Amino acid sequence: MIYKNKKDWETSTNKRVSLLGMSGLGKTKLSNMLQSTFSWFHYSIDYRIGTRYLDEHIVDNFKQEAMKNVFLRDLLLSDSIYISSNLNFNNLSPLSTYLGKPGSEDLGGIDFNLYKKRQKQHREAEILSVMDTNKFIEKSNNIYAYQNFVCDTSGSICEVVNPEDPNDPLLNHLSKNTLIILIKGDKKHKDQLIKRFKSNPKPIYYNENFLTEKWSNFKNMNNVDNKNVDPDKFILYCFEDLLDHRTPIYDSIAKNWGITINVDDISKVKNEKDFINLVSNYLDIL
């Protein structure tokens, strides 16, 4: 870790952290709060994925949908309208829409092979975006004169690393440049995430082996083929198992590469001072 103890952290004039954890546990909320102090640069992995590495794919998908509409088709072909993505830190809908959900097109799903193709694109984009972290640390300091830096990682970062491998390129990159902090919840928080997801199921990036197994099991259980899978029911079926699949990977990341902070403690952070003190307290017990 770049901060070996509480003293290293507190005396550093350039505090740099990477926040990891399940989507919905407060990584972006905390990052936004730190950025609002104007001394922390907020680097969002999801934003980088959607605006740098998948932006062209996202916009092309919009255009394909627009071409299905006669009115919009003519305007698009005559360059009378301009279509772009308006993705931002707090609204990742363009990225989610592109990833989509596998299953029946009549129910809003996409072909499973196309879905797997987009999943692979996301994986490649996430790896590149994580490896861009140091580039943005340098930019944030050299261009904008930010003293501190927070990397707001994607909820799926655990799917593209091997925390048991000391040579893992992504975790080496993050740990050499930032303090890796896992925001960890308990069963109560897991239940809240499941409840929230049930009310608004969103597209997700999956480990390919996990996806293939769940897809096969779901079809067998419901006696349906690829074209008749209900996309919302499928991702709901996956979600709880996905949380259980990811939890030990995240725990291993924190054990081998950083520290763990309880989400209840994170939720009490109201300002920059609270955050710095909280990290100090957790480093103090190492």
Image: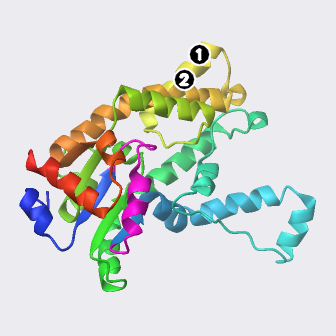
Q: Mark 1 = which residue?
A: 220
Q: Mark 2 = which residue?
A: 216
Which amino acid type is shown beneath numbered disc 2?
Ser
Q: Residue at x 59, y 63 (%)?
A: 87
Does residue 232 appear left or right of residue 211 in this picture? right
- Answer above or below: position of 243 versus 98: above
The image quadrant of residue 219 is top right
Relative to the observer, which residue lies in front, 82 or 125? 82
Identify the disc placed on residue 209.
Answer: none
Q: Residue at x 30, y 63 (%)?
A: 272
Question: Mark 2 near mark 1, Cβ–Cβ under 8 Å?
Answer: yes
Quarter of the image with the N terminus is: bottom left
Relative to the observer, which residue lies in front, 184 or 159? 184
x, y percent for residue 5: 8, 56
Asked which secondary structure carries label 1, the reply is helix
> Is residue 128 something one can see in this rendering?
no
